[in-house]
Image (tube, rainbow, N blue to C red):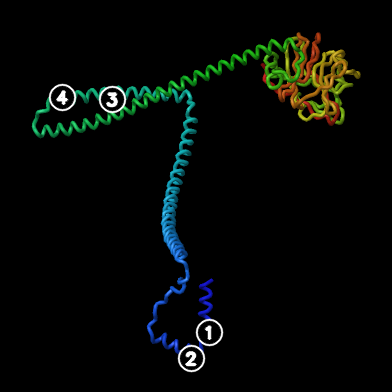
Amino acid sequence: MAFAKRCHVHTQDLNRRTPGHREAERENLTTAPRASPSLSFLFSEEPQEKLEERKKKFEELKKKFVQTEHEKEERKKKFARTEHEKEERKKKFEELKKKFEELQKNFARTEHEKEELQKNFVETKQDKEERKKKFEELKKKFEELQKNFARTEHEKEELQKNFVETKQDKEERKKKFEELKKKFEELKKNLDKWMTDLEDTQHENEELKKKVGELEKNLDELRNELARRKAQFKSTWKKAPLYPDGGFYVHLFLADWRKEEFKAVNVTLDAATAHPVLLLSEKGRRVTWQERCQDLPSSTQRFNSLPCVLGQLDISSGRWYWEVEVGEARSWDLGICRDNVTRKERVTMSPQNGFWAIRLYDGDYWALTSRVTLLTLQEKPLIVGIFLDYEAGDVSFYNMTDGSHIFTFPQNTFYGILRPLFRLWSSDSGSLTIVQVEEN
């Protein structure tokens, strides 16, 4: 406050001066030497303690300023060092990147070599014989090397006995010794290499023997298991004429194993029994429906009421089976019948009347029992197999597409001659074809 008052008074004095006074002061200022300004008037009335406090604050600010400048220099150095470390890290990253790419290449090459080794792991008998021959050749070469080595050692001893000779002889012997030494070293290298190959070959042969032994053991176990299951099946199917779906032997195995117990037969159609509306192929293996009835000679064997045809096979004993391709046919009957069934009049197809058959009609499958039985099939059959065991009174039907069981008639007592039966219902029925099977 005192300082402000003094400044205000001094300013008023200056403002009171006339312009003449001001010009005289300017001349005095230009001519008289300038004295250093004194700040005593500023601090003349200030207490000494405040002066000391201001000086201390000034020194502290000065130190802070110097310290700030020092920290600024340190930050500059640290920034430069950081930039240098950044460049170093960048170089190191590039080197690591190159090493990683090389490792990737080595890994891919190692994987390729691994696959090649796996492909060549299992060898044929011919490869085994070739390895055996190679082993014998290596053995012979090894024996030859042993002989050469002994001969070389003998020559070396002879050279040592005749060591004292003329300079010329000595030089010649020295040259010969060097040559023999080189040959000996080469032979030794080849011997080491052949010994390594021999050991590798023996090791590989031992590994192959172990693998073959394990495979033969597994194969024997599979054969024993297959034989056990086949024996179990053979002892079961005779006792159970009706096979429920979902059992172990259903699908894929059941029909194939049952074939082994039955005699396959290639059935041909008997033209003398064919209804006039049915057309047979030249070889007697396919039957189709035609619109107009054929003008055929009259015969006691021919069906006139039911559009059926029989196969040329008389069965009075044994086990037999044949296959019929139904394909996309819409309505048909398949099975067996007695040779003396009614052919001139309408008759219900049932076991009581001498018929054992299954039927496809209007999209549903039926078993022609005394009271027809609706069948539920998991898959539509394209080929139907008919299995007949005359002595056991067993007739069964199988879906040969997936080997599953379709239906088995309850056990009957057969007598007389039985024959294969085929029936179509209309012109939309399609055709039935007897499959050519390999007779056993």
The image quadrant that residue 329 belongs to is top right
The residue wearing badge 1 is 15
Q: Give the image location of residue 4, x and y in percent.
A: 53, 74
Q: Is residue 231 visible?
A: yes
Question: Does dot 1 land on a helix, a strand or a loop?
Answer: helix
Q: CA distance from mark 4 to mark 2?
A: 140 Å
Q: Earlier in the sequence, mark 2 or mark 3?
A: 2
Q: Give the image location of residue 364, x and y in percent.
A: 83, 26
For disc 3, the neighbor class at 10 Å (few under 14, some 14 to 19, many from 20) is: some
For disc 1, the neighbor class at 10 Å (few under 14, some 14 to 19, many from 20) is: few
Tell me: 372 left or right of 105.
Answer: right
The residue wearing badge 4 is 158
Tell me: 349 left or right of 230.
Answer: right
Q: Is residue 3 above or below residue 209?
A: below
Q: CA distance from mark 1 to mark 3?
A: 130 Å
Which image quadrant: the N terminus?
bottom right
Q: Residue at x 71, y 11 (%)?
A: 236
The residue wearing badge 3 is 145
